Image (cartoon, rainbow, N blue to C red):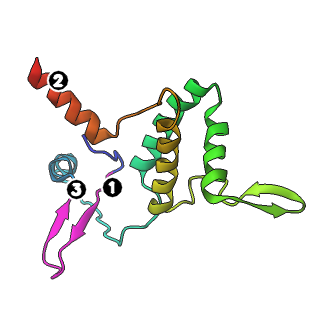
């Protein structure tokens, strides 16, 4: 399954510029096959550093469960993290978040925010832990192998 159903695929061009390594080559092949016989337009550009769709999906998945666990709404908990990680500043006598939304964060900033939430959950008593996707898959494979 294509991680981005809009036909956006991520890859890396080799140092010599002769090869392209795609993150999901099989999904790419399946996706372009649906256009058999059609004229298509392909755009290649340098990847932006804006936070990724996967980061955003993970954060919302985590925050939904974390907010429910703590008894807060997702927007409240998101704002707490944005203030804790990026701080506040004064505007017309009011204290407002430096970064009020995740949509303007780059991948590094989004990673910092996600890590802050994971750390907060891990330091609770009892800990609130959500597995990262690869760890979840590893444990699932281990359970399947044991069965």
Q: Which residue is mark 3?
A: 23
- Where is 113 relative to 91, above or below? above
Give the mark nearest the N terminus, 2 or 3: 3
**Tag 3, which secondary structure?**
loop
Span colored in magenta? 7-22
Mark 1 — residue?
8
N-terminal label among 3 and 1: 1
**Label 1 residue SS:** loop
* Of the two numbered discs 3 and 1 in the rendering, the one whose residue sits closer to the viewer: 3
Left or right, 79 with respect to 5, comes to right
Image position, residue 45 (x, y; %): 35, 71
Q: Residue at x 36, y 49 (%)?
A: 6
Secondary structure, mark 2, is helix
In the picture, which quadrant includes the C terminus? top left
| Residue at the right extreme of this rendering | 93
**140 sits left or right of 87 in the view:** left
Residue 95 shown in magenta: no
Residues 44 and 140: in front is 140
Asked if the stretch drawn in magenta spans residue 17, the answer is: yes
Hey, which residue is sitting farthest bottom in the picture? 16
Task: Check disc 2 and report the residue beneath it.
Answer: 143
Residue drawn at point x = 53 percent, y = 41 percent:
120
Kindly identify the residue that appears in the image at 17 percent across and 46 percent down: 30
């Amino acid at each position: 399954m294509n991680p981005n159903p809009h036909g956006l695929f991520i890859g890396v061009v080799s140092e010599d510029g002769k090869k392209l390594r795609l993150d999901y080559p099989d999904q790419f092949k399946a996706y372009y096959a649906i256009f058999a016989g059609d004229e298509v337009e392909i755009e290649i550009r340098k990847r932006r550093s804006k936070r990724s769709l996967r980061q955003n999906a993970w954060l919302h998945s985590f925050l939904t469960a974390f907010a429910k666990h703590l008894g807060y709404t997702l927007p409240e908990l998101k704002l707490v993290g944005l203030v804790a990680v990026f701080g506040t500043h004064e505007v017309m006598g009011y204290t407002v978040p430096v970064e009020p939304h995740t949509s303007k964060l780059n991948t590094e900033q989004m990673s910092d925010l996600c890590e802050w939430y994971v750390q907060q959950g891990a330091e609770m008593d009892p800990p609130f832990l959500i597995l990262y996707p690869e760890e979840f898959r590893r444990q699932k494979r281990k359970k399947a192998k044991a069965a």
